[in-house]
Image (spheres, rainbow, N blue to C red):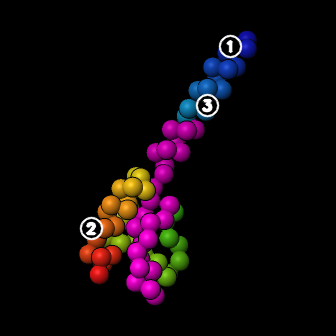
Amino acid sequence: MRQTLIAGALVVASMLLAQTASAAEFYVVRDTTTKKCTVVDSKPTSTTTTVVDNGTFKTKTEAETGMKTMKVCTQ
């Protein structure tokens, strides 16, 4: 009985971890006032920031690298 409960808990925990990892997205956004680009972990909902180009990435490192190649972010 105890082994079944532990196995079930491990399955649930691994499913939750997999969902969290696959759901993580990072966005390169540009502030319309300051004209500066930043990387954020949630899609912007305000009108003062906009997602740059196709600025959606799976990891923060990819987003930071991508930001360096975006023309509006390097000016």
Under circle 2, the secondary element is: helix
Residue drawn at the location 28% of the way across and 71% of the way down = 70
Contact check, label 2 and label 1, Cβ < 8 Å: no
Q: Earlier in the sequence, mark 2 or mark 1?
A: 1
26 drawn magenta = yes
Q: Nearer the viewer, mark 3 or mark 2?
A: 2
**N-terminal-most mark, 3 or 2:** 3
Residue situated in front as seen by the camera: 25 or 65 = 65
Does residue 54 appear anywhere in the picture?
no
Within 10 Å of the Cα at label 1, are there few (<14), some (14-19), or many (20+) other Cα atoms?
few
- Label 1: element kind: helix
Q: In this picture, is 70 found above or below 16? A: below
Q: Which mark is residue 23?
A: none
Neighbour class for label 3 at 10 Å: few (<14), some, many (≥20)?
Answer: few
Q: Is residue 40 above or below residue 14?
A: below
- Is residue 9 shown left or right of residue 53? right
Task: For the residues labelled 1 and 3, say whether their Cβ atoms are less than 8 Å apart.
Answer: no
Q: Which residue is mark 1?
A: 3
Q: Which residue is mark 3?
A: 12
Q: Amino acid at mark 3?
A: Val
Q: Residue shown at 51%/63% (left/top)?
A: 42
From the viewer's perspective, is residue 37 above or below residue 54? below
Give the residue type that dot 2 points to.
Thr
**Residue type, label 1:** Gln
| Residue 7 falls inside the magenta stretch | no
Query: Which quadrant would the N terminus be assigned to in this image?
Result: top right
Disc 3 versus disc 2: distance between alpha carbons? Answer: 40 Å
Calculate the distance from the C-alpha at mark 1 to the C-alpha at mark 3: 14 Å
Q: Could you tell me which residue is drawn at 38 percent across and 60 percent down? A: 63
- Look at the image and give the residue range highlighted in magenta: 16-41
